[in-house]
């Protein structure tokens, strides 16, 4: 167990020595001396402990676009870190070495993390990312409580129960949620999870006013059909046509050897999703035209993204400089 101890939030005692985690829809039953599926919470002496508390797999300063977030402070940099745990078991995981297996970590308490963020300078912002931040719930909760002046970003699979989600949403500024498919059987077979709860998370995030963007990793033959891209974009559009959608290229990893997603397939998916959404982007592959933001009213390019440069043409009121249409997002 990590040196820093923190009792977990959201769990019940079933009987002596037996606990049930309430953080995510797995509702893991955890016997004495055992951990839940995500490996982040352990039953020790009749209490559930967040054994990954303050244990980070890495600490980096990333471009905000890498998260990916395209309508949240374009061109800024953000302190990024994450835990060595995940509550999904995706067969195609692109970060499996740090999410599915034990990896070396280093301890960084919340005060040390704040010092790193403050040292970076304005804007004060941090991304909990790389693996699944909700399995670091207590650490994020405690940091946000002590340092409310820092904007908190989560890059998450969205697989969390409503009560803990509702508690932490007011502490967040932005989220990118993975919508891995629009079929329950995909989530069950490929991810060991459920679609319904992810859809609920997306809805709750939007309703809360937290800045929201969504990512789908396109896996050839599994979730990249024209019909499924249409369903994903239609669902998001039923919430708002202004939710940015990132359609990313997959590469074979972990337990899958399906050939990588082609640039043509990403572009095809982008065009389909644009029928329902105002802002759709291609990622993980060199596709210059699919990286830029265009005004949905007049078609002008309002944010140009290159590999090393961001040209934000929006006015100070976040409006298109050519027609005055307001582009949704966070730009200050």
Image (cartoon, helix red, strand yellow):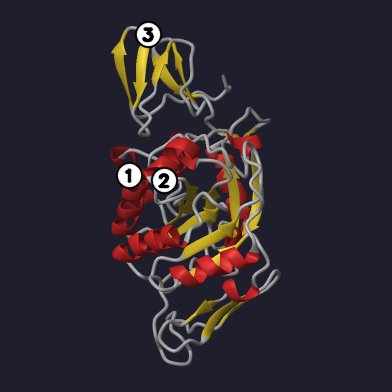
**Is residue 305 shown left or right of residue 233?**
right
Give the numbered dot on residue 17. 3
Instruction: Give the secondary structure at mark 1.
Output: helix
Horizontal and vertical percent position of residue 214: 45, 58
Crowding at label 3, few (<14), some or many (≥20) Cα neighbours within 10 Å? some
Which is more N-terminal, label 1 or label 3? 3
- Against 297, residue 260 (above or below) is above
**Relative to 287, is 198 on the left or the right?**
left
Q: Position of residue 33 (x, y in %)?
A: 48, 11
How busy is the neighbourhood of tag 1: few (under 14 within 10 Å), some, or many (20 plus)? Answer: few
Q: Nearer the viewer, mark 3 or mark 1?
A: 1
Left-right relation of 9 to 150: left
Residue situated in front as seen by the camera: 313 or 6: 313
Question: Rounded to the nearest whole Å, what is the CA distance between mark 3 and mark 2?
Answer: 30 Å
Residue 332 seen in the figure:
no
Q: Give the image location of residue 195, x and y in percent.
A: 37, 44
104 and 138: which one is in front? 104
Q: Quarter of the image holding residue 97?
A: top right
Quadrant of the rendered structure where residue 134 is? top left
Tell me the quarter of the picture where residue 278 sits: bottom left
From the image, tell me which residue sits under label 2.
158
Give the CA distance from mark 3 to mark 1. Answer: 31 Å
């Amino acid at each position: 167990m990590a040196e820093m101890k923190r009792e977990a939030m959201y769990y019940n005692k079933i009987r002596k020595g037996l606990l049930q985690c309430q953080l995510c829809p797995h509702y893991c039953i955890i016997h004495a001396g055992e951990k839940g599926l995500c490996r982040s919470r352990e039953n020790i002496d009749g209490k559930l402990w967040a054994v990954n508390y303050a244990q980070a797999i890495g600490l980096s300063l990333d471009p905000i676009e890498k998260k990916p977030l395209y309508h949240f402070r374009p061109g800024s940099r953000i302190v990024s870190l994450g835990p060595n745990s995940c509550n999904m078991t995706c067969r195609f995981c692109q970060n499996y070495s740090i999410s599915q297996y034990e990896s070396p970590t280093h301890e960084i308490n919340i005060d040390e993390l704040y010092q790193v963020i403050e040292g970076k300078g304005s804007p004060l912002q941090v991304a909990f990312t790389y693996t699944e931040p909700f399995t670091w719930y207590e650490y994020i909760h405690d940091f946000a409580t002590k340092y409310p002046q820092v904007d908190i970003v989560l890059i998450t699979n969205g697989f969390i129960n409503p009560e803990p989600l509702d508690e932490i949403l007011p502490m967040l500024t932005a989220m990118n949620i993975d919508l891995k498919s629009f079929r329950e059987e995909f989530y069950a077979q490929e991810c060991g999870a459920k679609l319904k709860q992810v859809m609920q998370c997306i809805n709750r995030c939007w309703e809360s006013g937290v800045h929201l963007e969504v990512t789908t990793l396109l896996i050839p033959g599994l979730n990249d059909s024209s019909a499924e891209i249409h369903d994903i974009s239609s669902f998001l559009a039923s919430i708002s046509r202004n939710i940015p959608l990132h359609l990313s290229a997959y590469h074979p990893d972990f337990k899958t050897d399906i050939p990588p997603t082609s640039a043509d397939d990403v572009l095809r998916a982008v065009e389909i999703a644009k029928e329902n959404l105002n802002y759709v982007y291609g990622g993980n592959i060199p596709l210059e035209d699919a990286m830029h933001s265009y005004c949905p009213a007049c078609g002008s390019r309002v944010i140009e993204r290159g590999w090393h440069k961001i040209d934000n043409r929006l006015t100070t009121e976040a409006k298109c400089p050519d027609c005055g249409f307001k582009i949704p997002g966070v730009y200050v």
